[in-house]
Image (cartoon, rainbow, N blue to C red):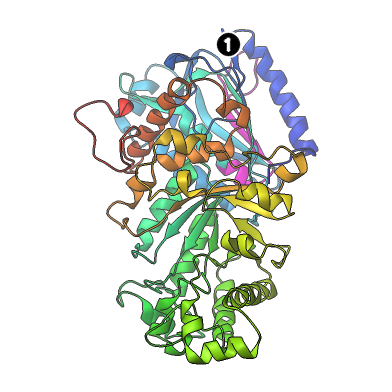
């Protein structure tokens, strides 16, 4: 659903008015430009190298020096949150990665720094992270002078997670100068008011086709925060392997590739909390009834027969008891309100060819397709009983739309037009059209990822509110710990800007001129931060560079 700011926080609005008044007094002193998102210039010098592009901003022509001993000052009921202080320390380490004792003493001998403090004001102390949490923020960075009483960078937000988003933007304004050997903010003063376009901005990570160590998953989550993505869709298990510990059914993770390629409850809990500190929810997926052959390694009775192993056996109550046990155990780990039940690519031949399942179908007067519907709806009931909202792949909607629970979130992947159909019937929808947003499709170039639009063909305002957003999918058949990050980046960043920034900003001009230089710059920012992002304009994703050249032109 699109983000709604119809009722702004009165405290935030009052402070913004005051902040803006002070800003205007400085604005008249500098040669300043106002950049509306629908009027981006075609030259590299006039582009704004922030990713994703903020909703509203103005900038000037000053250069400010930032103190390597930058301190934090907080205000508001939520300013003292551990989420805020931890984010400040993370971003301070990023911003001043190249600073040294020599650069500090060298500048101090000449003059004072322009920015020595960042003030973060948060109006709520609620740290619950759920769908639709307010991620808006305002950011002001300017020089102290006789017309301004403000001598610090200021971030103001309604929630701690808005403050985290503001810190990311501030970090991108800061750049190390190799001549002065200090961190500088160019084109100051900056005044930014920002908010996301969609509430759901996700990345799917598949750890069944190839096991990914905890540290790699954390690297993915950390890099997601750099583009303000806010949901990690953790496709933990599939037909190839079952690496997750489920205490109620301890033999399930016998389906792991090896005993070293597993996730304990503590591992999963650690990932969820690591993500939360960065404003990222984790949505787990247990895909049923297909894609579940690995379950039978520990519990063979789940298979229709030893020679015909999926879908899961629809005829046995044990199947649903086990699903309920899995969901009960992992509900203690995953607090996010959405839970993915899969439901895709269900081929029912095993049901119709296995004698006892075939007899059950006859006894219940069901076709195989009706049994598929029965299985999905029963799994939905289990998830809803655990206080989850079910998400299902689009095949469930395509096959029996009138039978789905009305709370169902339809997850598009097969092609275009599905979200348009789903919202027309009152369902919420997540966009992941495989032709553009499946990252394992290595031949999809950055511009096709960037141009894919979740709202395509949806013009009614009330219907648009049902489009929650979208998700890029990193399926793991051809990606493991050695190459998963360079397969994700930088193309996932193209989708991230589509999901965060205003549509009218993204649809204007020639994107080779207005977007490509910015994406190349951001790709280099990722590599400076230790993320092995591939060159932007490769013929195939994650290919090595064609030859010698600048990071900013690959």
Which residue is nearer to you in this view: 43 or 291? 291
Instruction: Quickly name the residue at label 1.
Output: 32
Task: Please tell me whether residue 252 is drawn above or below residue 496 in the rendered image.
Answer: below
Q: Which residues are magenta?
A: 137-164
Seen as rendered, the residue at the extreme left is 548
What x and y, as percent, mark residue 50? 49, 29
Task: Please tell me whether residue 398 is drawn above or below residue 517 in the rendered image.
Answer: below
User: Picture quarter containing residue 406?
Assistant: bottom right
Residue 465 counted in the magenta span: no
Which residue is nearer to you in this view: 122 or 42? 42
Q: Residue at x 26, y 41 (%)?
A: 543
Residue 138 counted in the magenta span: yes
- How many numbered discs? 1
The C terminus sits in image quarter: top left
Q: Residue at x 65, y 62 (%)?
A: 337
Residue 441 appears in the figure: yes
What x and y, as percent, mark residue 368? 57, 77
Q: Residues within 10 Å of mark 1 (few under 14, many from 20)?
A: some
Residue 132 appears in the figure: no
Which residue is nearer to you in this view: 37 or 297? 297
What x and y, as percent, mark residue 334? 57, 67
Q: Residue at x 75, y 25 (%)?
A: 17
């Amino acid at each position: 659903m699109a983000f709604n700011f119809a009722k702004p926080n009165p405290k935030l609005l009052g402070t913004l008015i005051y902040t803006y008044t002070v800003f205007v007094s400085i604005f008249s002193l500098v040669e300043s430009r106002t950049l509306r998102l629908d009027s981006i210039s075609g030259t590299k010098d006039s582009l704004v190298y922030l990713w994703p592009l903020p909703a509203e901003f103005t900038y000037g022509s000053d250069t400010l020096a930032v103190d390597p001993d930058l301190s934090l000052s907080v205000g508001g009921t939520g300013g003292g949150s551990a989420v805020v202080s931890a984010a400040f320390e993370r971003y301070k380490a990023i911003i001043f990665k190249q600073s040294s004792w020599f650069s500090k003493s060298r500048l101090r001998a000449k003059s004072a720094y322009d920015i020595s403090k960042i003030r973060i004001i948060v109006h709520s102390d609620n740290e619950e992270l759920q769908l639709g949490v307010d991620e808006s923020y305002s950011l002001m960075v300017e020089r102290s002078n006789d017309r301004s009483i403000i001598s610090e960078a200021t971030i103001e937000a309604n929630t701690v997670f808005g403050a985290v988003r503001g810190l990311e933007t501030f970090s991108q304004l800061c750049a190390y100068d190799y001549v002065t050997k200090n961190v500088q903010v160019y084109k100051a003063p900056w005044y930014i008011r920002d908010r996301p376009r969609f509430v759901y901005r996700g990345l799917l990570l598949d750890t069944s086709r190839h096991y990914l160590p905890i540290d790699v998953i954390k690297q993915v989550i950390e890099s997601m925060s750099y583009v303000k993505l806010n949901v990690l869709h953790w496709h933990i298990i599939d037909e190839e392997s079952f690496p997750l510990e489920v205490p109620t059914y301890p033999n399930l993770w016998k389906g792991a590739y090896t005993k070293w390629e597993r996730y304990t409850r503590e591992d999963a809990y650690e990932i969820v909390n690591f993500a939360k500190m960065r404003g990222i929810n984790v949505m787990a997926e247990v895909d049923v009834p297909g894609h579940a052959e690995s379950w039978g390694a520990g519990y063979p009775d789940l298979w229709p027969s030893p020679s015909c192993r999926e879908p899961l056996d629809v005829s046995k109550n044990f199947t649903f008891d086990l699903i309920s046990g899995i969901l009960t155990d992992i509900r203690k780990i995953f607090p996010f309100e959405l839970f993915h039940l899969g439901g895709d690519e269900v081929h029912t031949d095993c049901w119709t060819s296995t004698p006892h399942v075939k007899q059950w179908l006859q006894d219940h007067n069901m076709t195989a397709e009706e049994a598929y519907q029965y299985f999905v709806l029963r799994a939905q009931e289990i998830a809803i009983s655990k206080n989850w909202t079910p998400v299902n792949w689009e095949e469930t909607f395509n096959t029996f739309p009138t039978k789905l629970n009305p709370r169902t979130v339809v997850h598009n992947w097969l092609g275009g037009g599905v979200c348009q159909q789903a919202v027309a019937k009152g369902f919420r929808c997540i966009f992941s059209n495989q032709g553009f947003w499946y990252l394992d499709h290595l031949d999809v170039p950055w511009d096709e990822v960037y141009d894919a639009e979740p709202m395509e063909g949806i013009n009614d305002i009330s219907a648009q509110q049902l489009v929650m957003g979208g998700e890029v999918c990193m399926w793991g058949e051809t990606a493991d710990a050695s190459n998963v990050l360079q397969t994700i980046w930088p193309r996932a960043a193209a989708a991230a800007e589509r999901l965060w920034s205003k549509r009218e900003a993204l649809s204007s001009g020639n994107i080779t001129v207005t977007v490509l230089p910015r994406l190349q710059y951001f790709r280099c920012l990722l590599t400076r931060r230790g993320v092995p992002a591939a060159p932007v304009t490769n013929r195939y994703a994650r290919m090595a560079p064609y030859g010698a050249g600048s990071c900013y032109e690959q």
